[in-house]
Image: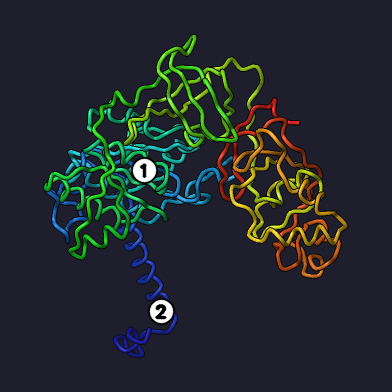
Amino acid sequence: LRHLSAMMGSSLPHHALLLFSAIFVNSSVYSFSKMSMSLKNSGKNSRKKISQNSQGPMFSADGSPQTKPKLLVFDLDNTLWTPELYQIRKSNIQAWKDIRLFDGAEAICTDLAQYGDSFWSDTEFAIASRTNKGEVAEYLLGQFEAGGMKLNEIFPRNVRKIFTGSKRRHFRELSEETGIPLQDMIFFDDDLHMNLREISKMGVLCVHCPRGISVELFRGAILQYDQMKQAKKKMGITLTMRDIQMAANGGVIESKSTSYEFSLDDFRTCTGIVKFFSPKKRYGFVKEGAVNGNGEEYFFHESKVPQGMFVKTGMKVEFETLPPDSSGKTAAAIVKSLEAETGSVIEMPCFSMSQPFASLLLNGIKTVETRNNPMFMDLKPGSKLLLHCGMRDWKDQEAPKMELRKAGFSNADIARLSALPNGAFSKGMIVGVLTLGKTWLASDKERQSADMERKVVATYENMGKYVTEVREASWLKQPVSGRGQPGVFKVNIPAEVLP
């Protein structure tokens, strides 16, 4: 208005100045809105209509690698998106509201979409996820967009391998589906100890993404792949952020290949009979052969059994053979049971607890659980919840004993009530089921009371802020093998083991 007054002088009335300014501003906003809408709509075009530059923007500063991987494979949970699907308890999950792409994942998928027919023209893109929420994952891949394309367009249906079990099967199928050798792939995943260790042994270059994939990790992995190919090095290693940063600063990544000479025949899918399995020892043997199990015998560890699957001696199973280890020992990973269902298998929520509190809870001594987070808040009173006994004991074993002595228990009683039942029960297994009461944020006064300390079997200093009543607790008829996870997670168990 000041500039307009100076230009027009006093000849233009004040109300006319206001009207003129309003028209000017509205016209500018309208023009800007049209420009913004035009830019937004231009991003919805197919990747074939977008820039056909020979070099993608992610590599404009570093130079284009001479050799690119023929297949880029991505995990989903905690790699492309967060949180993990098992952590979301609502049924109607919405993209960007309940779950989001990592910033790096969105940038990378945008690059793949926009330069898929130019810079990435000789590279295919795939998914390898072992989530048991396959339908939800497929739905979300159709909801998320990057670079004007939905993720289920960037990753075609035939190379979206989303199913439970060892990821060796995922990669065997990807190699067979695409005809691409495993040594020409890069795999991005957050699970260092299981997924990346197994897949790197197959000869795939793996990249650890502990907090989701980032542009720095992705770009560094592509450049490192190129250098390793030029130097004709074996690809079966797992790169970390430290490796990527070392290479970026001119350092040399020491050879730490764990790959073996193998063929895809080393990863056969077979049927057979469980010859022996010990839940307590956590291993067993399976014999190939659908009828009598009279073929070759394979060792399998509990970690190679799907989460929540009930395994017992004599049962028919489908399993996958693994490459021999350095000692030549043959092994297997159990895929699924082939038993005719004599009883139903049900999905239930589960949480993990350390000893001695797991036993004290199931023996009816501990009747209240406390946590520093509201992990039980969404579970309605009356909800059934499975209890997994953690591998690690509580850090202070003497503290609960002191509380039990104050309550009048003898040392013999404390030892008996703090122990798991004899037989198959052991740490690292799903051992009981609870019926929960209400959960609330307790006051300091509540938690400092002698009654609360007796129910929790802990002092105020060792309690969490959120208090959950346990209405009922019972041991399972038979423990079920399973690995603990943070928070409340879902498992499948045979209904026959419930009390």
The mark lying in front, picked from 2 and 1, is 1
Residue 116 location (% of width, % of height): 23, 42
Residue that carries the numbered disc 2 in the rendered image = 16
Secondary element type, mark 2: helix
- For marks 2 and 1, the one nearer the N-term is 2
| Residue 31 vs residue 190, the one in the foreground | 190
Residue that carries the numbered disc 1 in the rendered image = 197
Image quarter where the N terminus lies is bottom left
In the image, residue 377 above or below residue 477: below
User: What residue lies at 26% left-to-right and 30% top-to-bottom?
Assistant: 262
In the image, residue 472 above or below residue 23: above
In the image, residue 108 above or below residue 271: below
Q: Amino acid at mark 2?
A: Ala
User: What residue lies at 55% left-to-right and 43% top-to-bottom?
Assistant: 86
Residue 470 shown left or right of residue 206 in the figure: right
Q: Is residue 38 visible?
A: no
Q: Amino acid at mark 1?
A: Arg
